[in-house]
Amino acid sequence: MSEHEAATITANALVKKRAEILFEIGELEKRIERLQTELVHLDAVLRMFRPDFKAEELPVRHRRPTKSPYFRHGELTQRIFDTLRTKGMIASLDVALAAMLDKGLDPESDPVTRTDFVRRVTLQLNALAGKGQIEKVGRGRAMRWKLAKQ
């Protein structure tokens, strides 16, 4: 098989794959449209039973983040508690950077992984705060975390 034939076969396969992806996107858009219509109808029926119903005030269910290849089950929570016991008060960035360095990753040269680590640590800190195990101190970039008073 010549290089030209191989390139033609590859290009044809890529065009076919592109068409499949576009088709799938179209199908998902149709499904989203159906679900949005169902939601409108559901809200209308809810208002019939509860005239004061406000959909905006309902909590939104979020997808759980995918498992990280860098952390085994419970490791992030353990790291957070270990750091809190030693330092007393921490920022999510501190835990994320320490975890990256422990795993042989360079936070300066890999901003995507650094952002993922910080996001995961922050999500776990918020979950622990929701359980009453730790407390937020401050807001925004100055936010720190400490162990909750027992």
Image (tube, rainbow, N blue to C red):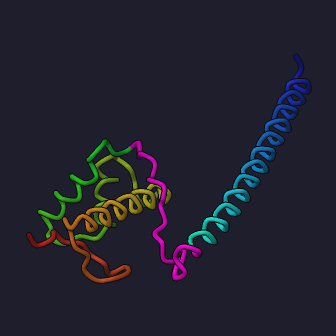
**In the image, is 61 to the left or to the right of 21?**
left
Percent from the top left, x then y, of residue 33? 73, 59
Q: In this view, does 33 lie above or below 48?
A: above
Q: Residue 1 appears in which quarter of the rendering? A: top right
**In the image, is 54 to the left or to the right of 18?**
left
Percent from the top left, x then y, of residue 101? 31, 53
Image quarter hosting the C terminus: bottom left
Percent from the top left, x then y, of residue 27? 76, 47
Q: Is residue 68 above or below residue 16?
A: below
The segment highlighted magenta reads 47-69
Give me the residue at 16% from left, 69% from top. Answer: 147
Chief SS of the magenta region: loop
Give me the residue at 48% from left, 72% from top. Answer: 58
Q: In this view, does 26 lie above or below 81?
A: above
The answer to if 58 sits in the magenta stretch is yes
Compare residues 139 and 11 and report the one nearer the observer: 139
Compare residues 31 and 86 and report the one nearer the observer: 31
Compare residues 83 and 122 and report the one nearer the observer: 122
